[in-house]
Amino acid sequence: MEVIESRIDKNSDEFKANYAAMEKMVSELREELRIAREDRSEKALKRNAELGKLTVQQRLDKLLDRNTPWLEIAPLAARGLYDKKVHAAGSRAGIGLIHGREVVVNANDPMIKGGTIYPLGVKKGLRLQTIAMENHLPTVTLVDSGGAFLPLQSEIFPDADDGGRIFYNQAIMSKMNLPQITAVLGLCTAGGAYIPAMSDHVVHVKGTGAIFLGGPPLVKAATGEDVTAEELGGAMLHCRESGVSDYFANDDAEAMEIIRDIVELLPRKEKSRIPTRPPKDPIYEPQEIWGIVPRSISTPYDVREIIARMVDGSEFLEFKALYGPTLVCGWAYIHGYQVGILGNNGVLFSDSSLKATQFIQLCDRQGIPLLFLQNIAGYIVGREYERGGITKDGHKMVNAVATATVPKFTVIVGASFGAGNYGMCGRAYSPRFLWMWPNAQIGVMGGEQAADVLVTVKNDQLAREGKPPLPKEIVDGIRGPIIESALKEGNAYYSTSQLWDDGILDPAKTRDVLGLAISVSLNAPLADRVQGHGTFRM
Ligand code: COA
């Protein structure tokens, strides 16, 4: 394969200014991640120590293989929401290695409001279960939670994708033969009692862990019985008498050791095979991406420059290089795994959509995972393009993306607007993982365009009524809030806070994260590749 020839001038003012801007964004990201990991009140730290518990980080350190990668999921979920202190939506979660086996871990943080579950905590739990189901991974849950965050109970309880779905999914995962291991490290009350109950293996820590449908205050209120948490649902009761728990642990550290032993004995399955070759570093430094990504998402740049810094040896076999040039498609390797890459180089036209459709079909038939590098303002609009059938050609691409059975991965490296988000495998198109870069923006359309559409609609209404168009001050009054909310709700931090993605990545680290993610995806069998797609509108 040919090495991509970079045309970047690293000494240019443009490169230096871009680099400095991205460096700032990445250092802000690191600081946000540090805050989410470490910002805990003195009171909560003291209480945790009094109870003789390890911190979440200490638990993870003991649980996971030393010096191995940890792919953290949604570390900035709920950022800026609630009281701005429900970091990571109340749990540290990700995919790590235990005895060399890739495992989904979700660990409640008791130092954040007693580890209680907020609405976005439920969403995160469901996302982790989806990851486990799609990639056929065992799960380890470290429960240390006061259950539902009661002031927001109506947002957590009743709907299809609320708390009950977590237990429903546990039953489905059990049926799928995906092992679920739960450590009871704090109280598992009411609905929370079903997290261990629905698991295959329950490890229970003496003194601090308890499982009951109603805690001591409720029992007192209901029956007048005075009982401690340990007597009502402690490790000794559940390991010796009720049989609810399976493994007795004297403390958190012993519980982590027992989980490791359980995972070690789980039957090993062969991973799926895709074309591989020995990994090698890109020829161009991945960190140079900082200087390539323009400071404004509306400034175009060649996505090949990004691909050159992401793939092994910077080698790329481009598919239909001369046709549909606003979408770059081609094959490469990332950490030794072959992938088919689709990267935007402008808006999507009929030709680029058809090229994408053919390329996706080829990758799907050949069992090659797909990587979408999204930087898309949308599909082209206008009379000429409608006549040319852009809608039906866009439909073919969207159809192919939706029905492709190979693992799909999406990184939003710039803009993600309109149906372009769908065609380039946005969240609703079930990529196994989706990440954003710190500069990325997402929405139906940009704020300026949305504001213009609304002003035009209003002026058309007035014209129908024979009235003059809106004066400037009213136009400004309509445009301002729309542009402001698009900026606020369209940026990467808002997206990640809402769990529209799995996290924000340093562009320079994206290659490594993709390598891990592809490896994780191969735990699931590749689907039958002759299934084909839906009917294409011709
Ligand atoms: N909803 C909302 N807030 C809750 C909560 C709940 N279910 N459970 C605890 N909290 C809050 C507390 O008010 C406290 O808030 P603060 O830091 O602002 O003062 C914080 O979480 C820590 O609680 P605290 O009791 O001080 O800590 P602890 O370590 O001694 O005990 C629990 C933690 C979870 C064991 C204990 O708070 C508890 O039993 N909670 C109720 C559990 C329950 O019955 N849940 C039913 C819902 S399914």
Image: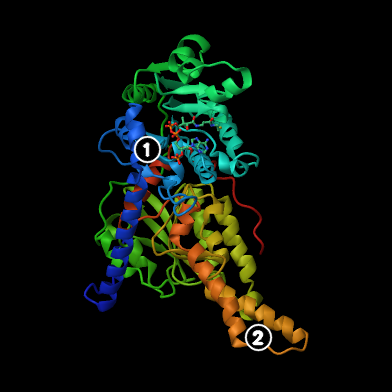
In the picture of the structure, the residue carrying the numbered disc 2 is 470
Label 2 beta carbon less than 8 Å to ligand 1? no
Q: Is residue 108 visible?
A: yes
In the picture of the structure, the residue carrying the numbered disc 1 is 44
Is 288 above or below relative to 263?
Answer: below
Label count reads 2
Hey, which quadrant is residue 397 in on the image?
bottom right
From mark 2 to mark 1, how far is it between C-alphas? 55 Å
Residue shown at 37% from the left, 61% from the top: 317
Q: Secondary structure at mark 1?
A: helix
Q: Is residue 409 left or right of residue 10?
A: right
Residue shown at 48% from the left, 15% from the top: 231
Is 123 above or below relative to 175?
Answer: below
Residue shown at 40% from the left, 73% from the top: 296
Q: Residue 384 shows which numbered tag?
A: none
Is 190 above or below relative to 511?
Answer: above
Q: Amino acid at mark 2?
A: Leu
